[in-house]
Amino acid sequence: MHSLDGDIMEERKISRAVISRLPRYYRYLGELSEEGVERISSKELSERMKVTASQIRQDLNNFGGFGQQGYGYNVRYLYNEIAKILGIDRQHNIIIIGAGHLGQAIANYANFERRGFLIQAMFDVDPNLFGKTVRGARVYSLDSLEKFISENDIQIAALTIPKARAMEVADRLVKSGIKAIWNFAHTDLTVPDDVIVENVHLSESLMRLSYRVSNMDAIPFEGKYD
Amino acid sequence: MHSLDGDIMEERKISRAVISRLPRYYRYLGELSEEGVERISSKELSERMKVTASQIRQDLNNFGGFGQQGYGYNVRYLYNEIAKILGIDRQHNIIIIGAGHLGQAIANYANFERRGFLIQAMFDVDPNLFGKTVRGARVYSLDSLEKFISENDIQIAALTIPKARAMEVADRLVKSGIKAIWNFAHTDLTVPDDVIVENVHLSESLMRLSYRVSNMDAIPFEGKYD
């Protein structure tokens, strides 16, 4: 069984598709672990996750394998290793810009906290929201954004504001040193190369659903969309 | 210029990747149209969308082309054709199960309405929410779910409830004839083949962001993740 040593880290060029699937492995392994399952073969995991066993082996081989032929995977070990790969074995401090329903929904989501994502503050332009707290995260005026970031160790900013103001706020975040933006605004942000944007475009997801319903016969069956 | 006639509909087996990109074309064409742009070359569109011109041509060729060599695309025409392909040239009635912050955020999102997605009702188990309305969508007791569906022409159900109850509610939706579920619950739903599930797993999106921040050097640069 390989460990994630420096060599492997340097060699790997993991495809987007594999990375997109990792959180799902993590979720299933977490559930198995909660159920008390200690080992699982790629065949059993495959049946449960409804992907092929060879895909599972290939995906996990990108990170050095984790399985011994004939013995299957050690669930807890694999779970922890994927956590390390995903970078969720450490704490991430998050701020949310936009304390409307969506921002509050995110702040309220206990699961994030369990995975080390701590919502440290929310920011808004609506004075009626200032001082409100959601699961311990207080809403501040957007005016104090730069000050808060400079005084706190913030890694991720979630943007849940209308498209019209998203780019302007993203610029302020970048100038404040934020390297990761979780963007819910319905627009593409232009940021420097060393800043990462992960988009959640809900209307695009809804349109994909609409497409699939409208074109059921024309849909290839080889996989899922997410 | 081809039209979307029956032949083309029958032939096409569009890849997931192309379908995933269509809503983004739709968004950019909508913005161009609002700016008064009437024609655009694949090169100009490519610069704006930051994808290659050949990808744009390939993607749109899946649906019969829409462009004449040297003349570029007619923005409004292409916008309308993509709307038809996405099935958003007609009205879709939606219900939301779960009237918490996330459900209310979705009900509040005016953009959905503009694209023909009308939120007709919300359902919850919390009596304190019954009767509340969000942008005209009233919250009903989950007990009346089947009755509401049978009396209204509902195409899509959004699930914004905790994972623990998601499968049970999905079963009820399927029994009531719903063919499209927009699933925000952090679990995979098992549904019959003729029911479509589009997942929005926010924690998985956040983990992808975490991965990318934690592995910036190892990330392939060939594209975006969404």
Image (cartoon, coloured by chain):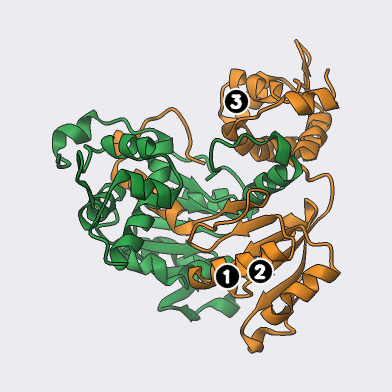
Chain colours: A green, B orange
Q: Secondary structure at mark 2?
A: helix
At horizontal 52% and vertical 39% (from top left) the residue drawn is A190
Side of A50 where B8 appears, left or right? right
The disc placed on residue B168 is 1
Q: Secondary structure at mark 3?
A: helix
Name the chain letter of the residue that bears numbered label 1.
B
In front: label 3 or label 1: 1
Name the chain letter of the residue that bears numbered label 3.
B
Say if residue A148 shows up in the picture.
yes
Quadrant including the N terminus of chain B: top right
CA–CA distance in space, label 2 to label 3: 47 Å
Say if residue A175 shows up in the picture.
no
The disc placed on residue B172 is 2
Side of B226 where A151 appears, left or right? left
Looking at the image, is B63 positioned above or below residue A103? Answer: above
Residue closer to the observer: B163 or A149: B163
Name the chain letter of the residue that bears numbered label 2.
B
Label 2: few (<14), some or many (≥20) within 10 Å? few
Q: As shown in the figure, which amino acid type bears the numbered disc 2?
A: Arg
The disc placed on residue B5 is none
Question: Quadrant of the rendered structure where residue B26 is?
Answer: top right
Give the percent coordinates (x, y) of residue B152.
84, 67
Q: Are marks 2 and 3 in contact (CB under 8 Å)?
A: no
Q: Are marks 2 and 1 in contact (CB under 8 Å)?
A: yes
CA–CA distance in space, label 3 to label 1: 47 Å
The residue identified by callout 3 is: B47
Q: As shown in the figure, which amino acid type bears the numbered disc 3?
A: Glu
